[in-house]
Image: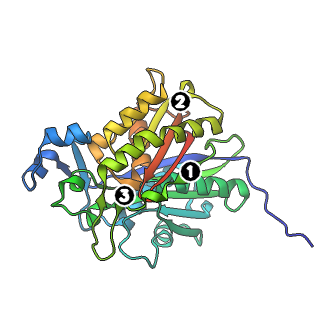
Amino acid sequence: MSIQLRKGAAGARILGLGAYRPRRRVTNHELAEVMDTNDEWVQSRVGIAERRWAEKDETLVEMAVAAGGKALAASGLAPDEVDLVVLASASLKEPIPGIGPQVAHRLGIPRPGAFDLNAGCAGFCYALGVVSDAIRAGSARNALVVGVERLTDVTDLSDRSTAVIFADGAGAAVVGAAEEPGIGPVVWGSDGDQYNAIEIAAGTGTMTMAGQAVYRWATTRLTETLEEAMEAAGVGPADIDVFAPHQANLRIIESMTRKLGFDADTVIARDIVQSGNTSAASVPLALTALLESGEARSGDLALVLGYGAGLTFAGQVLTLP
């Protein structure tokens, strides 16, 4: 007797986005009061003018619930219509239990499949690929993806090479079944020969980063991933309305933009200027900001890319909700 399989949807699409940005704004001038840095040095190297740092009450769970609740509201779905929750984060304090089930419970989602995923700064795009495939395979009908980070918990604030970059926040997307695909095939991978370029070494509790090595890797190896993601989705640079890569470094974003040859009216996400590097939260935060400002519109075609610790990377083409 053969095993019966579920029949999934033809495709998946993002139904709603949500974001949470911590209350506290930290400027480069404020950092200059406690470390050897200044506004010109930071902006010329990474493009950051300010970032958000979470207060004690702005926990990973609280921020994830806030962003997830906004995404649910924007999607028009009731909590009991969601059957899968994937939470992407690289800054969990405890390995067990994961916080995905807790976030789902807080949002009133009854007994979903729920788990945490750690692919560093590529986490949101990895999770988006997972839930899109799950919906097309019939394992889920609607899913919630949350990228959430408190990188200040794992950052040595006396180390200016990381303290000026990393920040906190949460971004979320509700993904649902669709007759017309709104999420292209994920193009993902890893370069494990550089696994320790970004790491929290055992017993240290703080993150270190080989900044120049990561910069060279991102600017020389990842443009082809973006090209493959467009090819897999059957589109080209001229079709892309919005380019929203991981907000790691403004110079990396500008380098990728030049190499891909977008049209002059393509909207480029530069959320890093106000938000810093929020790891797994950066892509949904950037997309939400563009939609809220009116720079991007519902129905626009967006090219996204996450990349980071591992070294991991994942990109896909999306239709904005």
List x then y, in percent, for residue 321. 54, 40
Q: Give the alpha-carbon distance from disc 1 to disc 2, as whole Å.
A: 19 Å
104 in relation to 253, above or below: below
Choose top left, top right, bottom left or bottom right for residue 253.
top left
Choose top left, top right, bottom left or bottom right for residue 234.
top right
The residue that label 2 is drawn on is: 240
Q: Residue furthest left?
A: 33
Q: Residue at x 31, y 47 (%)?
A: 212
Q: Earlier in the sequence, mark 1 or mark 2?
A: 1
150 in relation to 316, above or below: below
List x then y, in percent, for residue 65. 42, 62
Q: Dots 3 and 1: beta carbons under 8 Å?
A: no
Q: Residue furthest front?
A: 193
Q: Residue at x 60, y 56 (%)?
A: 131
At label 2, which amino acid type do we have? Ile
The residue that label 3 is drawn on is: 197
Sort mark 2 into few (<14), some (14-19) or many (20+) by Cα contacts within 10 Å: many
Q: Residue at x 62, y 51 (%)?
A: 176
The residue that label 1 is drawn on is: 188
Q: Residue furthest right?
A: 1
List x then y, in percent, for residue 218. 41, 44
> Which disc, if any, is residue 75?
none
Q: Is residue 320 visible?
A: no
Sort mark 1 into few (<14), some (14-19) or many (20+) by Cα contacts within 10 Å: many
Total marks drawn? 3
Q: Residue at x 48, y 63 (%)?
A: 87
At label 1, which amino acid type do we have? Trp
57 in relation to 23, above or below: below
Camera-side mark, 1 or 2: 1
Q: Give the alpha-carbon distance from disc 3 to disc 1, as whole Å.
A: 18 Å
Q: Quadrant location of the N terminus?
A: bottom right
What secondary structure is found at the residue carrying circle 3? loop
